[in-house]
């Protein structure tokens, strides 16, 4: 029992150290991209020596992939939560709000994802063309059903989702620009939410 308890504590300590390193790596990758990030910079951000960091991760590639794998799980949740049996406008409203929440709560993760995409998605292309594409097609079929039922105007569902991604993630990926132009507005996400809901939802509701 004592040995089991010691093993558990060692596992917990290792997990905590790995999380510390990954959080530091996220900060460095989000600021500099994969190519611009260095092991020395990650070690400094983690408050550890470079050899100590390498004890837990063989290199920055492994840290980067671990971050992206975890990010994709989080990134898919807002779309997965869209229900086929819900009221269309409310389901889309909820999706817009969840995506803005992601931009507000996870700006570093959003910039990490954006950097990977700009580079051509060399490390997550299989996820994009596999799981993400399948999920988008599943939800696009839901939206097509709403359109066929006369509950939404006719739009291309995939490009509708692209438009929601572009406008919501803008507030994370280009936050410096948003604050430079609009000022350091603490309510910017609430204002953005109201604006995007008006644009998308009013535009999608059928007119007599």
Image (spheres, rainbow, N blue to C red):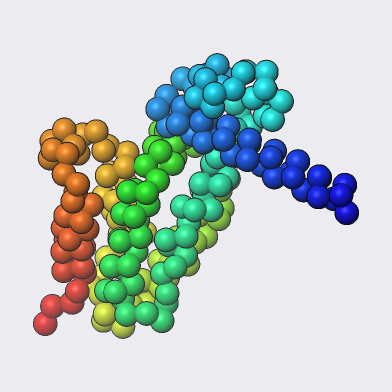
The residue at 33%/72% (across/down) is: 91
- How far across and how far down the image is residue 18, in percent? 63, 36
Q: Nearer the viewer, residue 54 or 20?
A: 20
Image vertical order of residue 200 relative to residue 182, above or below: below
Q: What residue is shown at x 66% (from left), y 42% (from top)? A: 15
**Picture mark count:** 0
Question: Can the viewer see residue 91?
Answer: yes
Q: Quadrant of residue 30?
A: top left
* Residue at (32% x, 48% y) in the render: 104
Left or right: where 11 falls relative to 135: right
Residue appearing at x 88%, y 54% in the figure: 1
Foreground: 190 or 136? 190
Name the one closer to the observer, 99 or 14.
14
Res. 185 image quadrant: top left
Residue 82 position (above or below residue 46): below
Residue 88 horizontal/vertical position (percent): 31, 76
Q: Position of residue 198 (x, y in %)?
A: 15, 64
Q: Nearer the viewer, residue 142 or 14?
A: 14
Q: Which quadrant is home to the C terminus?
A: bottom left
Q: In the rendered image, is residue 123 in sight?
A: no
Q: Position of residue 46 (x, y in %)?
A: 54, 27
Q: Residue furthest front?
A: 2
């Amino acid at each position: 029992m004592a040995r089991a308890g010691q093993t558990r504590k060692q596992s917990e300590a290792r997990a905590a150290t790995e999380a510390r390193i990954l959080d530091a790596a996220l900060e460095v990758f989000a600021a500099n991209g994969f190519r611009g990030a260095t092991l020395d910079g990650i070690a400094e951000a983690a408050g550890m020596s470079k050899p100590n960091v390498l004890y837990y991760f063989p290199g920055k590639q492994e840290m980067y992939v671990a971050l992206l794998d975890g990010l994709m799980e989080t990134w898919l949740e807002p779309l997965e939560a869209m229900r086929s049996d819900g009221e269309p406008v409310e389901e889309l409203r909820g999706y817009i709000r969840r995506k803005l929440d992601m931009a507000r709560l996870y700006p570093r993760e959003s910039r990490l994802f954006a950097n990977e995409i700009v580079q051509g998605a060399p490390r997550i292309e299989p996820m994009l063309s596999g799981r993400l594409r399948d999920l988008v097609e599943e939800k696009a079929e839901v939206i097509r059903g709403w359109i066929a039922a006369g509950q939404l105007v006719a739009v291309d569902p995939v490009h509708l989702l692209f438009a929601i991604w572009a406008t919501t993630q803008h507030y994370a990926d280009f936050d410096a620009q948003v604050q430079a132009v609009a000022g350091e507005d603490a309510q910017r996400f609430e204002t953005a939410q109201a604006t995007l809901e008006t644009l998308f939802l009013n535009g999608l509701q059928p007119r007599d």
